[in-house]
Image (cartoon, rainbow, N blue to C red):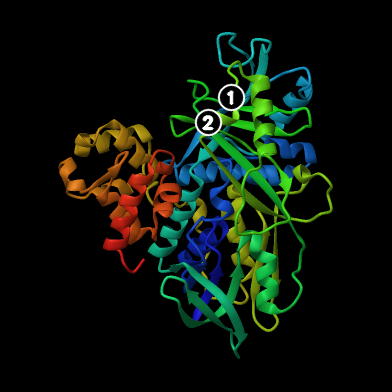
């Protein structure tokens, strides 16, 4: 009998699996689609304290998030990097004294090691912003490759003995004398398997309430409020490395963030979502909303036709009857039912706090799983993150694989860190990387992703394991799909 079944392969599920496996538990994680195929890959790509949450007096959440910002940046410096944010001031903006107070709290609620403090700044009239904007503020947070963060946690779980089952859906459960018997449906092979476990964690994000009701035939503990956040991607808007936090007339803030060298990521909106949980799309109204605020602040106007990519995701927030969706708490709530056996449901949460959420989950399950070991993830690095400085890692890579060229070396290091050396192995020339599918994606990388990181389709590789989908043509996608189908038929 397994100790723990985790349902859901987003950041919370993968983080719980890694923590539990590292404590010596026998862990199985199932995900009905791909890892990070839901909310966890549709975020604003930030590890942050949540500066605007201070307005809603969520000091505890901000402090916890700021502490985790330090922990996670140390654990995965290859995919999490400090980033400066500029807050330009317009007449409708929050008052300068209010922002100064907020930034003072942001600087001092938790100890900072890797992040600079905030400061007032003069806006360069030759810069990208509207020339009427002369002053503002600077503060620091971190940018993350969100879907790779999920995959790295799943890898960490696998390295410690967990079973990670993608394309595998939990369809039913029945009570045994000492635990649960669960039916898992493998969508790839269209087969059912039964497993026994002592406890279950429901970490399915937007589906948490529906799955809880489906499996238990009882009403869910909390009402879930689904809030859709949408983003657009446009060609790079400015040459600087800083991001911007823009304040709208309605009080919301919009981030404008350099992304993947050639692009700018703009978001997010916040709108109530009442429809299907299977597909989310940005609306024309949301695009117009984002464009209008960007065009208010920037010299160069962007049009609907400039949008090269967009995405939308639904965040599952606990319904606290707050009218304004922006003010609904981003904190999490854990509900444990022990009759007849333990099943814990995760409500809410955010990417930044996934690690402490996992610790809290396992703390609640301690009585049911008394053999688990102590907490351990706070000082651990994620796979690929075991290096001191990025510059040293780059030099080490160049000394052995200079023939890759700087662009490919940087992309690999920013995705895989020290795992790059394992993937490349004894390769000594470009010919050793095999077929080139386009845009520096080679057969050796694809083989690694399919055999070690659960990739089973072009979307798994081009959007969640990398972001090369922005560059691939249909013909290149088809070529990659044919290779995966022929080389990995079990997928």
> Which residue is the site of mark 1?
302
* Quadrant assignment, res 294: top right
* Quadrant assignment, res 431: top left
Closest to the observer, 16 or 46: 46
> Which residue is the site of mark 2?
234
Closest to the observer, 11 or 366: 11
- Label disc, if present, on residue 172 of the rendered structure: none
Residue 374 seen anywhere in this rendered image of the structure: yes
Query: Residue 360: percent from the left, percent from the top?
Result: 63, 61
Residue at 39% of width from left, 53% of height from top?
458
Residue at 38% of width from left, 63% of height from top?
159
User: Is the residue marked by circle 2 packed among few (<14), some (14-19), or many (20+) residues within 10 Å?
Assistant: many
Query: Residue 341: percent from the left, percent from the top?
Result: 65, 81
Whether tag 1 and tag 2 are in contact, CB under 8 A, the answer is: yes
Helix, strand or loop status at disc 2: strand
Closest to the observer, 86 or 266: 266
- State whether residue 447 is above or below residue 202: above
User: Is the residue marked by circle 1 packed among few (<14), some (14-19), or many (20+) residues within 10 Å?
Assistant: some
Cα distance in 3D space between marks 1 and 2: 8 Å
Residue at 47% of width from left, 81% of height from top?
193
């Amino acid at each position: 009998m397994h100790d723990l079944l985790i349902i859901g392969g987003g950041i919370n599920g993968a983080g719980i699996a890694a923590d539990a496996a590292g404590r010596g538990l026998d862990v199985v994680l199932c995900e009905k689609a791909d890892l990070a195929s839901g909310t966890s890959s549709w975020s604003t790509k930030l590890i942050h304290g949540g500066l605007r949450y201070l307005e809603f007096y969520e000091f505890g959440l901000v402090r916890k998030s700021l502490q985790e910002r330090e922990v996670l940046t140390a654990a995965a410096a290859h995919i999490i990097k400090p980033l400066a944010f500029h807050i330009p001031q317009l007449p409708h903006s929050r008052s300068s004294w209010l922002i100064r107070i907020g930034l003072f709290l942001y600087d001092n609620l938790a100890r900072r090691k890797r992040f600079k403090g905030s400061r007032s700044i003069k806006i360069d009239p030759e810069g990208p912003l509207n020339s009427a904007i002369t002053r503002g503020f600077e503060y620091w947070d971190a940018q993350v490759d969100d879907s790779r963060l999920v995959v790295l946690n799943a890898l960490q779980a696998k390295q410690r003995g967990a079973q990670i089952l993608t394309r595998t859906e939990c369809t039913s459960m029945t009570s045994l004398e000492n635990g649960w018997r669960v039916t898992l449906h493998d969508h790839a092979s269209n087969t059912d398997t039964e497993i026994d476990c002592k406890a279950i964690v429901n970490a399915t994000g937007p589906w948490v309430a529906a799955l809880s009701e489906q499996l238990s035939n009882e009403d869910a503990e909390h009402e879930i409020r689904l809030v859709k956040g949408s983003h657009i991607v446009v060609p790079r808007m400015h040459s600087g490395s800083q991001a911007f936090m823009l304040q709208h007339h309605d009080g919301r803030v919009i981030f404008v963030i350099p992304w993947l060298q050639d692009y700018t990521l703009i978001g997010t909106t916040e709108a109530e979502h009442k429809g299907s949980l299977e597909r989310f799309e940005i609306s024309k109204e949301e695009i117009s909303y984002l464009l209008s605020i960007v065009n208010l602040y920037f010299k160069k106007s962007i049009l609907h036709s400039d949008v090269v990519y967009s995405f939308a995701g639904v965040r599952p927030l606990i319904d606290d009857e707050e009218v304004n969706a922006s003010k609904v708490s981003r904190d999490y709530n854990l509900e444990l039912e022990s009759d007849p056996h333990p099943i814990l449901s995760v409500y809410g949460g955010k990417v930044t706090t996934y690690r402490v959420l996992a610790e809290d989950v396992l703390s609640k399950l301690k009585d049911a799983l008394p053999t688990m070991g102590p907490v351990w993830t706070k000082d651990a690095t994620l796979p690929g993150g075991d290096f001191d400085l990025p510059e040293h890692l780059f030099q080490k890579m160049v000394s052995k694989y200079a023939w890759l060229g700087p662009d490919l070396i940087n992309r690999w290091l920013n995705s895989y860190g020290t795992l790059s050396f394992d993937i490349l192995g004894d390769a000594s020339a470009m010919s050793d990387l095999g077929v080139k599918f386009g845009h520096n994606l080679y057969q050796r990388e694809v083989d690694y992703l399919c055999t070690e990181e659960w990739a089973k389709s072009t979307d798994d590789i081009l959007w969640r394991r990398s972001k090369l989908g922005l560059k691939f043509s249909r013909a290149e996608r088809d070529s990659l799909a044919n290779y995966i189908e022929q080389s990995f038929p079990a997928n």
